[in-house]
């Protein structure tokens, strides 16, 4: 209940500019799918590559998951730091009966809303491009929301310990971008050297991408359970550490 | 619910707060009673804000006992916070919302039903005289308006206790007087106010009772009048003198005043009657450049207790 008031506050702020953010969340998948999927895809036509799905489907499902990871990570960086440091919204909230736990879950809940707001139009565009082969595809939306939150929670935990935003340059350059490129988004991780494959399998995006593909273009296998468990585990760890870090920060 | 000792709204015994290498509050005792305006007076770093944060349940104490309306902040923070209002030292208004939305959203944080909140917010906006700014964003407001909005926000849950951390720091004189006036009205409505300040006139204007904090401890306690009587004299004679007169003054001034303070630019004589002291000095043939007789203020008390050296 109390955490819901934070979601409502964020909704009120978002609502003023919803047109531009909605426009972006439609435009982004359109550009990706046309330029990369159709354009690049027409050149990449090796027989039997991409599990036989064709590049457009392979790429679309990968970039779908990767966009939600990026959005999840971003939502836990500058916006959260602003509310801790510059605008001090959390300090104001803590003078009300809200607790640090309420704040953490409220913000995470809002991140889920923004992830839905990105992934649903993206899903719709993919349907227009005839990406999906299976009715289970609809489950890709909750999967990418879970993926986004699993990436957001640990970054939220990191943000709670930061005094300045310098670390974000490193985070995006050396963590998010390599993940984005090398977690099976643009090409199957089987193309990576052995150590690269091991590394890729340790990343949340890999598990998210695998799940999305199983539910949309390939068959759902038993490994799906492991992928979900990985993401839920990461989310849980992020919440536990995050609440603790935020308590240390806000209740000195 | 455990009742705190006596009928005190806030009761602290041996209350302490320490950070890794710093003792911010060192075993202080105080009681705040219902309906009074209670002040924490002290230089920067004396421990006022740390104490306020412990009362407001946003900083866990490290020692001693603390009860706020009979509840313990370490176990019943939400219960306490539902009944207090907080005006922090630096405004933390929601700059992404308008004036009215700031109050509406804050009412949501308190789980106040929307229709109750609506009429209450109308009253609060009128109370702090921001009617014509209702739809404005926060950023363009003046410092005084932001402060008043922060006060209105702190009242959205109709608190029994209002905590104000340096409520008028940085405001111009008109804005300060308006804030004082609103706070005085709240007191008349029965709201208990706890204020920290380093403005002596503010403490004298508003506080029924206050404690002086210095170096993490409470060093004096009483009403402004009591403190002046105890630590100062009724009047102070301030003299500006040439170096020559200063030297001669040192030889003749014994017994003219209860206490004399030799500052680089002035000489302060603490005495029952400034006029009498001045005529005695004139009678000795000494003529200061300027002479000012004034009432003793809390500032004299404060400087007597905490010293004149700069605290940074």
Image (cartoon, coloured by chain):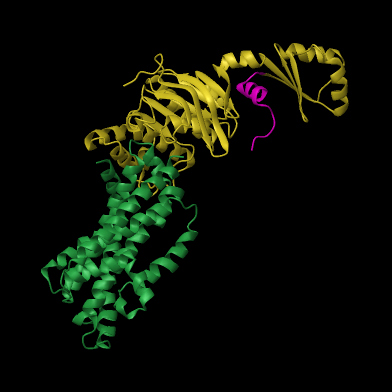
Chain colours: A green, B yellow
Residue B281 lies in the magenta-colored region: no
* Quarter location, residue B247: top right
**Residue B42, position as x, y percentages in the image:** 58, 28
* Quarter location, residue A231: bottom left
Which quadrant would the C terminus of chain B be assigned to in this image? Answer: top right
Camera-nearest residue between A165 and B136 = A165
**Residue B88, position as x, y percentages in the image:** 45, 36
Q: What stretch is highlighted in magenta?
A: B295-312
**Residue A51, position as x, y percentages in the image:** 21, 80
* Residue located 33% across and 41% down the image: B100
**Residue furthest toward the front?**
A194
Q: In this view, does B116 lie to the left or right of B50?
A: left
Residue B304 lies in the magenta-colored region: yes
Which quadrant would the N terminus of chain B be assigned to in this image? Answer: top left
A235 shown above or below B248? below
Q: Is residue B178 in view?
A: no
Q: In this view, does A207 lie to the left or right of B186?
A: left
Q: Is residue A54 left or right of residue B289?
A: left
């Amino acid at each position: 209940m109390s955490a819901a008031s934070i979601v409502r506050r964020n909704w009120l702020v978002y609502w003023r500019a919803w047109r531009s953010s909605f426009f972006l969340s439609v435009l982004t998948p359109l550009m990706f799918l046309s330029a990369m999927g159709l354009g690049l895809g027409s050149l990449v036509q090796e027989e039997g590559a991409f599990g036989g799905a064709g590049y457009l489907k392979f790429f679309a499902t990968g970039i779908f998951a990767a966009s939600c990871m990026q959005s999840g990570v971003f939502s836990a960086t500058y916006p959260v730091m602003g509310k801790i440091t510059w605008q001090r919204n959390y300090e104001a909230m803590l003078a009300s009966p809200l607790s640090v736990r309420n704040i953490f879950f409220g913000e995470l809940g809002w991140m889920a809303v923004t992830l839905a707001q990105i992934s649903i139009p993206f899903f719709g565009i993919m349907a227009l491009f005839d990406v999906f082969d299976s009715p289970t595809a609809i489950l890709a939306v909750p999967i990418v929301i879970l993926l986004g939150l699993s990436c957001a929670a640990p970054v939220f935990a990191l943000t709670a310990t930061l005094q300045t935003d310098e670390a974000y340059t490193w985070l995006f350059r050396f963590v998010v971008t390599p993940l984005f490129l090398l977690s099976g988004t643009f090409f199957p991780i089987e193309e990576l050297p052995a150590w690269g494959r091991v590394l890729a399998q340790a990343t949340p995006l890999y598990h998210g991408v695998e799940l999305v593909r199983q539910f949309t273009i390939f068959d759902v296998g038993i490994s799906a359970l492991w992928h979900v468990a990985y993401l839920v585990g990461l989310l849980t760890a992020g919440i536990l550490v995050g609440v603790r870090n935020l308590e240390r920060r806000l209740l000195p | 619910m455990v009742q705190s000792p006596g009928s005190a709204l806030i009761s602290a015994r041996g209350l302490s707060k320490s950070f890794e290498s710093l003792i911010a509050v060192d075993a202080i005792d105080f009681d705040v009673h219902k309906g009074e305006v209670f002040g924490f007076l002290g230089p920067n770093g004396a421990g006022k804000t740390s104490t306020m944060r412990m009362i407001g349940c946003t900083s866990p104490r490290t020692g001693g006992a603390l009860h706020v309306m009979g509840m313990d902040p370490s176990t019943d923070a939400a219960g306490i916070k539902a009944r207090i209002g907080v005006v922090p030292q630096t405004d933390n208004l929601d700059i992404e919302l308008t004036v009215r939305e700031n109050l509406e959203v804050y009412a949501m944080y308190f789980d106040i039903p929307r229709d109750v909140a609506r009429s209450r917010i109308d009253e609060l906006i009128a109370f702090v005289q921001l009617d014509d700014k209702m739809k404005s964003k926060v950023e363009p407001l003046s410092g005084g308006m932001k402060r008043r909005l922060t006060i209105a926000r702190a009242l959205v849950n109709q608190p029994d206790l209002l905590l104000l951390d340096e409520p008028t720091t940085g405001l111009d004189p008109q804005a300060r007087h308006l804030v004082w006036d609103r706070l005085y009205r709240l007191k008349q409505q029965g709201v208990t106010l706890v204020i920290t300040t380093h403005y002596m006139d503010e403490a004298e204007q508003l506080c029924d009772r206050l404690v002086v904090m210095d170096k993490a401890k409470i060093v004096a306690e009483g009403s402004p009048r009591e403190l002046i009587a105890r630590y100062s004299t009724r009047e102070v004679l301030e003299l500006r003198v040439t170096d020559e007169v200063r030297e001669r003054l040192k030889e003749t001034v014994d017994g003219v005043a209860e206490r004399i303070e030799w500052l680089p630019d002035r000489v302060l004589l603490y005495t029952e009657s400034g006029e009498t002291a001045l005529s005695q000095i004139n009678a000795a043939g000494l003529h200061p450049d300027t002479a000012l007789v004034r009432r003793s203020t809390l500032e004299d008390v404060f400087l007597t207790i905490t010293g004149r050296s700069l605290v940074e």
